[in-house]
Image (cartoon, grey):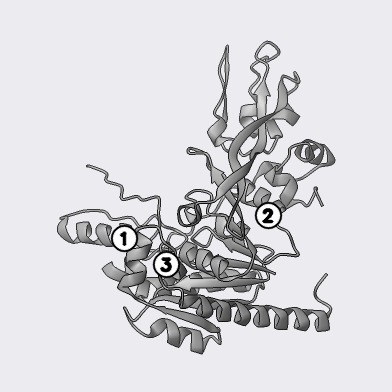
Amino acid sequence: MVISIASGKGGTGKTSVAVSLALSLDSCQLLDCDVEEPNASLFLKPLITGKTFVNVLEPWIDESKCSHCGECAEICVYHAIAVFEKNVFLLPQLCHGCGGCILVCPEKAIAEGRRSIGVIETGTSNSIAFIQGILNVGEHMPTPVIREMKRFIKEDMHVIIDSPPGTSCPMIEGIKGSDFVLLVTEPTPFGLNDLKLAVDVVRELKIPLGVLINCHGIGDNRVREYCQDENIPLLLSIPWSREIAEAYSRGIPAVEARPDLKENFRSLFRGIMSLAERKRDYDVQLGARR
Amino acid sequence: MKQLTIISGKGGTGKTTLTAAFAHLADNAVIADCDVDAADLHLILTPDIIRLNRLSVVEYPCAKVTDEVKRIWRKVEGCLFAESHNLFA
């Protein structure tokens, strides 16, 4: 069972929810896929025991073979190669690793090189198997790191994915292949606006979804109304509480500050399991799955 | 003209709120909401939309995936193109 915790809006509490849910289960894998700003480790302080580098294709140019014909620069839509009369110049940060330049070079002066764009760290925190991806600063492609992280998933375990925010490539890469997506939002016009966008994305991917309202009690009732109108299960509302906010500001997970919340998270998990299984049974009936 | 960017690593820290406050204080300013996947500034500033500009993207010339291209992609662990074409499956 793979559960993704996502949201359109940033700062709604994805990491807090992912960590608290993980701490409420007997054992699970937690993947912090917010590779641009991974924060879950600040709550969990895991012991890191493994590191894997994530590489992408990068052209390595042998200047001694280069005739400066400019074919490589011409095929590159990202303008990652500039060819001058006497030199050729690669801008690695613009390269998307398609290999087009390698193919078109008539002098075979470009080799298939590698560039590391990030690292995947694995470790443990109590009963949680912890995995986090870290994209190097300056790199523009978070998706290859997220994709590589998914290889660490153990299907026989409960897997919780802390997804990147937003509704574009990194978020989609994060939630893709999940059995369920839990969208975390806040009861404000901003939370609602971005929730609607995120719901559209998750529906497009045909993954069952539910909503968690964080900081319930502030703002208005429109998120709840939207969920009712759209037939989206509202699985948990976490009340705004000074106690939780103070713990958060010191890097302490909500369920450690308020152990009574563990039962709420366990019941959230049971709700997710039954919704995901219902979807799976439905798909099996339709013959849609596998 | 001075250009000022409001940015943060973490989400939900108040970029849009601060931008809206500046927009309120500034005379004759151009305000751009660049959070294109979840834009929220319009909820505060409630602008009248005068014109919609449709954007299109250039189609990638390597979109035509030949066996030769696949051979190169497959050799790279974690290559995004190989993955998206299920070459590791």
* Residue A17 picture location, percent across and down: 49, 68
Taking A82 as reference, is A136 above or below it? below
Residues at marks 1 and 2, CA–CA distance in whole angstroms: 33 Å
Are marks 3 and 1 in one subunit? no
* Residue A285 picture location, percent across and down: 82, 84
Closer to us: A275 or B2: A275
Are marks 1 and 2 in one subunit? no
Please identify, in this view, whether the residue under mark 1 or under mark 2 is nearer the observer.
Answer: 2
Residue on which the image places disc 1: B16
Label 1: few (<14), some or many (≥20) within 10 Å? many
Of callouts 2 and 3, which one flags the residue occurring earlier in the amino acid sequence? 3
Quadrant of image for the N terminus of chain A: bottom right
Where disc 2 sits, the SS reads helix
Residues at marks 3 and 1, CA–CA distance in whole angstroms: 14 Å
**Residue drawn at (66%, 37%), measured in percent from left and top?**
A56
Residues at marks 2 and 3, CA–CA distance in whole angstroms: 24 Å
Which three-letter amino acid code belongs to the residue tagged 1? Thr
Which three-letter amino acid code belongs to the residue tagged 2? Lys
Residue on which the image places disc 3: A12
Where disc 3 sits, the SS reads loop
Label 2: few (<14), some or many (≥20) within 10 Å? some
Residue on which the image places disc 2: A150
Label 3: few (<14), some or many (≥20) within 10 Å? many
Residue B61 falls in image quadrant: top right
Closer to us: A84 or A2: A2
* Residue A94 picture location, percent across and down: 55, 35
* Residue B14 picture location, percent across and down: 31, 60
**Would you say A33 lies left or right of A100 here?**
left
Closer to us: B76 or A257: A257
Which three-letter amino acid code belongs to the residue tagged 3? Thr
What subunit carries mark 1? B
